[in-house]
Structure formats: C-alpha cells, structure tokens
Image (cartoon, rainbow, N blue to C red):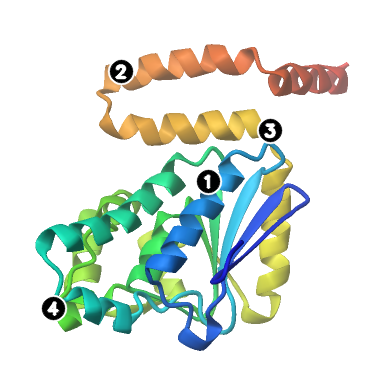
Amino acid sequence: MYRKILYEMRDGVTRITLNRPDKRNALDGEIVGELKAAFGTSAADDACRVVLLAGAGTDFCSGADLANLEKTAHNSVLENMADARLTADLFLMMRNHPRPVIAAVQGRALAGGCGIATACDIILAAQSAQFGYPEVNIGFVPAMVMAILRRSVSEKAAFELVVTGETVSAARAHELGLVHRVFGDDQFSMEVESYVTKLAAKSASAVMLSKRLLYNMDSMSFEAALQAGVEINAIARQTEDCRKGLEKFLKKKT
C-alpha cells in the first residue's frame, strides 16, 4: 500500500515511519500523499489511541526533496499553489486528527522536516537532534508552517528561527518551547516507547475532546471559549470513560 512510509498499528499506537533513509527521508509529492492516507486511516481506526511519527535511519527528515523542488521552479503560480496545498492539507489533517500525534525526532529535522515535526501535537527529541528552517538561505520561505510555529513559540522566537535559518540543538528547541521532552540518545527509543504507552492508556474520549477544544479556541473570543468549555464539560460527563473513572476514584476513597 505504501512505498515511502511504513505503517503499523500495535497496542493502541499507530506508528508511521518516513522510509527514505538514503534520501534522509526527504519529502516529495508521493510521500506527502502517503502521509495523508496514513493519517486518514489512523483517524478512522477506533483502536488507535496515539500516532507516533518517526524517520528511518539517522535523520527524522531533511526537508523537501531538492530534485522535486527544482522541477516546481518552472511551474506557474497556480501549479505551485496546488503543490503547496498538499502540505497545507497534511498539516490540517494532523491538527484535526482525533488522537495525539507525536514526533520522535532523531538526527536532523530541517525545513519541511521541521515543519512536519512542528505540525505534531508533541515533539520528543533525542539529545543530539537538530531543528531548523533554513529555507531563507536559498531564498525560500517556510510559509505554511508559520501558522503552527507562531502558535508553538513566541512571536520573536519564531521570527528569529525563520529569518536566520539557523539550526538549533534539541536543548535550545526545548528552551524555545518547540520541543516538549529531550532524552539521551542511548535511552531515546526506550523513553519514547514509555511515553507513548502511558499516553495510549489515557481516556481516548477525554484526550480527543481536550485536543479539539484546545485547538478550536484559537479563533474564539474569551466568552466563546468559556461557553465551548461548558459544552465540552457537559459532554465529557456523559462518556463511558468518565463514568468508569469516577466510579474507580470513589471506590479508592471508601
């Protein structure tokens, strides 16, 4: 079914792996299409509790395939907009996915690769991982990902990242708020497994409702956000997970 990614569902975790290690998992139209299909499949799978996105080999993703990018340089504006829309649609699918999407970043996550990681809900990084948006160095712009980056770090931090094109360490990315956790290289795989296993054990309905509410608040006024919270609060009380959770909690107290 897939040529450039790997897809596996195990123990509530959907594992999607960029599988072009010889190309440092560079992105092209085909791999973006396969990612969209994979995220669509996992979103429809009730057994899926968490999506884990990783890269095969030494790097997470080096960005766009330059050979593919060179071809598009001769396209019309409308053709380039259609091509860019594919990535924008992928980011939107990840944002609207009912489950948490976690990036496990080893090696380099650069340009579009850093964009894919940033589009995930949570980034777990190996200590030696590197992040950056070097597009400015070739006169390009990390345009679509700015919508997410601006919501992930401060405005000034986002500005510096995109206009300098500098590559930053995992530790610095963590300081900026781009990365959630940094683990030692030797323990990275084990720590990632522990993290996703714990998250997969959480209430699926509570996690889904929390993700939906939090992201939908972006465009709401304070009053509208509170009202949305009232509605989600009421819905959450009616879920089976909440009823079971309350029963278990009350039994512990007696």
Residue tagged 4: 139
Q: Which mark is residue 224?
A: 2
Type of the residue with mark 4: Gly
* Image depth: mark 3 or mark 4 in front: 4
Q: Are marks 2 and 3 in contact (CB under 8 Å)?
A: no
Precedes in sequence: disc 3 or disc 1 = 1
- Does the rendering let one see residue 88? yes
Q: Position of residue 93 (x, y in %)?
A: 43, 45
Identity of the residue drawn at 34% across and 58% down: 87
Give the secondary structure at mark 3: loop
Between circles 4 and 1, the one closer to the viewer is 1
Mark 2 in CB contact with mark 4 (< 8 angstroms): no
Mark 2 element type? helix
State the separation of the CA atoms marked 4 and 1. 33 Å
- Horizontally, is 191 left or right of 120 in the view? right
How many badges with numbers are in the image?
4
Q: Quadrant of residue 245?
A: top right
- At x 42%, y 77%, the residue is 26
Q: Nearer the viewer, mark 2 or mark 1?
A: 1
